[in-house]
Image (spheres, helix red, strand yellow):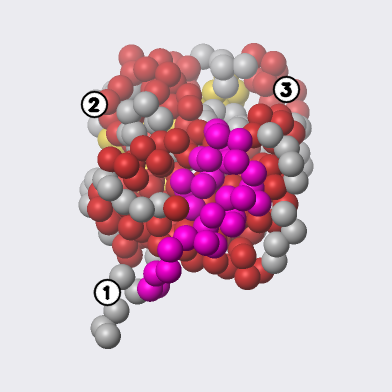
Amino acid sequence: MQSIGVVGAGSWGIALSSTLLKNGCSVCVWSALSDEIDMLNENHEHVDKLPGVKLEGDITFTTDLGKAVCDKDIVVLAVPSVFTRSTAKQMREYVKDSQIIVSVAKGIEENTLMTLTDIIEEEIPNADVAVLCGPSHAEEVGIGLPTTVVAGAKTRKTAEYIQSVFMNDFFRVYTSPDILGMELGGALKNVIALAAGMADGLGYGDNSKAALITRGITEIGRLAIKMGASYETLSGLTGVGDLIVTCESKHSRNRKAGMLIGQGYTMQQAMDEVKMVVEGVYSAKAAMGLAKKYEVSMPIIEQVNKVLFEDLSAKEAVRSLMMREKKSEIERPGW
């Protein structure tokens, strides 16, 4: 039996805990919130964030971080991206050499432009840091709907071990060495999903959504390649796959926040209404910072930033995108 610590009791941490329990693992879930742990102990269900998903099996809930980390075969780090660094700092004293930490949040740190695995490695240099991501809404994983994700790690051995622990008949796991490409796809698609939601809020149609998804993955891929990632990753599950589900799904908090902004809400009003962390808002400035650092054109992400932080209306942002200078879709046409 594998012993797993899940650090973070949000919807994704709970959905993954449910999956691991079904695989016969022993699971310990940590939250910094004592009220949340009391609720989980009482109900074995997160009645606020993932109602209806019962956690049955060898599971414990705790506010003791050491209990969730010490001597675990894998630690799943599932706190929102803005808390990754502070949580990793607290974890450091409990992590043994080469202990596997799987990052499952999505984001880029605004002030350093670091990916989440880079942050974890900086704070816990003795850990074996990996990532698990793909098109995987917690609401569907929690009830066992077929889902495919990717385990990224520096070594094949670690990636295949994570694959073997998480994979079952409804949760298929592929492996990849391209951690950077996976993390860029996972973080930046949230910004594009805000734009897709704005289009929905404005009442635009399928044509607009298809354009945003297609040109969005072009922007993300352009940056990822410049940073050294593989475009194959961006054309796979953690790139276009994750982008499609986040731009289209009723479960997507980024799409929902964007829709509210398109309807006239301010960014803060939209975040308050969603009542969950909207990762795209936190990644938008970082994405723009990376675009400037690597001298990459990212017009959709630029307009999203203007809407979020410069009071540009969503309608004007769309007009700015539509009225940009004429271009060829192919960067090197063969005429």
> Label 2 to label 3, Cα distance in Å?
34 Å
Q: Residues within 10 Å of mark 2 (few under 14, many from 20)?
A: some
Q: Earlier in the sequence, mark 2 or mark 3?
A: 3
Q: CA distance from mark 1 to mark 2?
A: 44 Å
Q: Tag count in the figure?
A: 3
Tell me the magenta residue range. Answer: 300-329
Residue placed under numbered mark 1 in the picture:
332
Please name whichever residue, 242 or 13, is drawn nearer the observer in this view of the structure: 242
Q: Which residue is the site of mark 3?
A: 39
In front here: 121 or 327?
327
Label disc, if present, on residue 127 of the rendered structure:
none
Query: In this orientation, does residue 111 appear?
Result: yes
Which quadrant is home to the N terminus?
Answer: top left
Question: Mark 1: which secondary structure?
Answer: loop
Amino acid carrying mark 3 in the image: Met
Of pointers 1 and 2, the one earlier in the residue sequence: 2
Q: Is residue 325 magenta?
A: yes
Crowd band around label 3 with a 10 angstrom C-alpha radius: few (<14), some (14–19), many (20+): some
